[in-house]
Amino acid sequence: MTLRLSSAGESHGPALVAIVAGLPAGLVLDRDAIDADLKRRQEGYGRSPRQQIEQDRVEVLAGLRQGRTLGTPLALVVRNNDHRNWTWGMSPWPAEGEPSGKGTKPVTLPRPGHADLAGVLKYGHDDVRDALERASARHTAVHVAAGAVAKALLATIGIAVRGATVDEEALRANIDAARKERDTVGGIVEVRATGVPPGLGSYATKDDRLDARLAFALMGIQAVKGVEIGDGFALAALRGSQAHDEIRTDRRRDTNHAGGIEAGVSNGEEIVVRAAMKPLPTLMKPLGSVDLQTGEAATALVERSDVAAVEALAVVAEAAVAWELAVAAKEKFGGDAVGDFVAAHRAYVERIAWARA
Ligand code: EPS
């Protein structure tokens, strides 16, 4: 069974939901570990006051019994506490009573850089909110929960995944300066995965390639505008003799310019991927836009937002990479029961006589 993930949920709607299908049965999940990742995602430097309203926790509605997966779809829910302030404005059904709370007036001032303009044009909305609510990075919360489940599966075969910002100190100084100037900033995150055996992904077709799948997963996260694997763009300026990682007799490498992937296949070295995030588009000193109701020049919507969400992206990118590695590992090792998955991995590393570094 292929691992599959689908999600739904608006930023100020009742909840975010994800369905994870294709997990082997018997995988032990730790609620505290999932909630710890949800908390890490919320704690990032430069977040908006929204993070004081939310205390993200996972709820499991299906697929789990006494902390063990059943091999059936796992249904995950993360509730939006802020929905209580939007019950009329974000009511799934026609709202009753007098309009009250937030979201009652249509938004008509699209923000450059957000989904606002393209979203209303594409879907025929009159209210920009109908586009921005789903485009919001809020829904990354439930992807982090799914990523924590993927990490539990990967841990059974000794794979660990960790994301971090690149140059934390400079990033925080940049955030402080931008906050003073009522502006926003982006930044770069890096995800590393250890314990990945050679042979995940394939060069056989382009959608098998592990590098393509990781790039797809990272570009699928809000505000990500660039992805690189290993030394990425810097490789273009090197000679071949400098750019490639020589193979030792034990088939390991002393360098890792390739970021653990050659020709779309993991090579057994640490997987290293980076994602670049653009500055967030909700600005306190807004850019020029158009009022969609009047057609007149205007400035874009101003509302509560983050100065930066780069530290959150490190956690979200970690979840995305973990998810893709879990998909690739499940594809390679299969297994309806987690023991089958682990045994297939063991047999494989024995066949290739792969000794972990
Ligand atoms: C977001 C705008 C802000 C962020 C939000 C993403 O939300 P609000 O408009 O409610 O202040 O805080 O991210 C989250 C809520 C989250 O949990 O990550 C946007 O426009 O994308």
Image: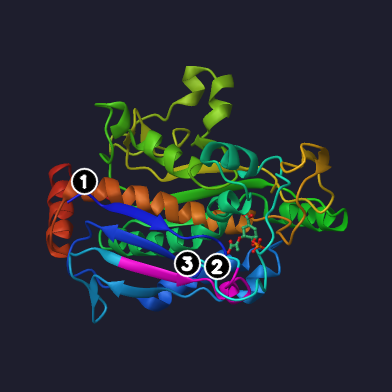
Disc number at residue 331?
1
Closer to us: mark 1 or mark 3?
3
Mark drawn on residue 93 = 3
Q: Secondary structure at mark 2?
A: helix
Magenta stretch: includes residue 79: yes
Mark 2 / mark 1, whichever is N-terminal:
2
Q: Who is closer to the viewer here, 286 or 336? A: 286
What's the residue at 41%, 46% (across, down)?
270
Q: Is residue 242 found left or right of 338 in the rendered image?
A: right
Residue 317: x %, y % from top left: 49, 51
Magenta residue check for 348:
no
Q: First in sequence, mark 1 or 3: give its number.
A: 3
Q: Which residue corresponds to the image point at 53% horizontal and 71% vertical from the top-left?
A: 80
For mark 2, does the 10 Å Cα neighbourhood hold few (<14), some (14 to 19), or many (20 or more) residues?
some
Q: Is residue 349 visible?
A: no
Disc 2 marks which amino acid?
A: Arg
Closer to the chain start, of discs 2 and 3, is: 2
From which residue to which does the magenta span run? 75-88
Residue plotted at (31% across, 62% down): 155
Q: Position of residue 234 (x, y in %)?
A: 58, 28
Residue 40, label in figure: 2
